[in-house]
Image (cartoon, rainbow, N blue to C red):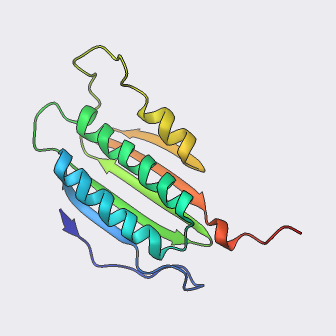
Amino acid sequence: MRVVAPTSGDEAGHAGPDLRLTDVPAVATALTRARERLTSWARTAGLEELQIGDVTLATYEAMANVADHAYDQPGGVFDLHACRRDGVVTVTVTDHGRWKSPGRPPGWRGRGLLIIERAAGQFELTPHARGTTVCMSWPVRADEPSRP
């Protein structure tokens, strides 16, 4: 896993640098490390604890989908980018493989996209000729005006 040189957060100064992880191996141990890095980053982005949980859960599901579905052979990688701009946190997970069907019956599996959809404020899945991008975003609740 490579960490790319950070860029700055939003103009209000709420967040530190963007999180950019490239060439993350699509294997369980690397997913765990990427999730830990994302959780640490989310704490600097001004998210409330419940939102940090939603960001972490949705992103982990997107990464797990890469490990389960993007590559027919071992050795696949993905990129993760997290940023905060104008009161919105956005996380993208991009693989460079081709979607493959699971080799076993769905059973209790197959709910990753539903989990992402429910946990994310907004969610978009975009297949490309050379991979898939999952883009998720959340408004930063701490930035929302208080209601009387």
Q: Which of 128 and 81 is in front in this view?
A: 81
Single out the residue that lies furthest toward the left: 74
Relative image position of residue 110 (x, y in whole percent): 39, 25
Question: Residue shown at 47%/50% (left/top)?
Answer: 135
Quarter occupied by residue 47? bottom right
**Residue 121 against residue 12 in the figure, above or below:** above
Can residue 7 be seen here? The reply is yes
Can residue 26 be seen here? The reply is no
Quarter occupied by residue 76? top left
Q: Is residue 29 left or right of residue 44?
A: left
Q: In this view, does 66 lie to the left or right of 114?
A: left
Relative image position of residue 88 (x, y in whole percent): 59, 65
Q: Which of 103 and 57 is in front in this view?
A: 57
**Residue 136 against residue 2 in the figure, above or below:** above
Question: Residue shown at 24%/61% (left/top)?
Answer: 22
Relative image position of residue 52 (x, y in whole percent): 49, 60
Q: In which quarter of the image is the C terminus?
A: bottom right
Q: Quadrant of the N terminus?
A: bottom left
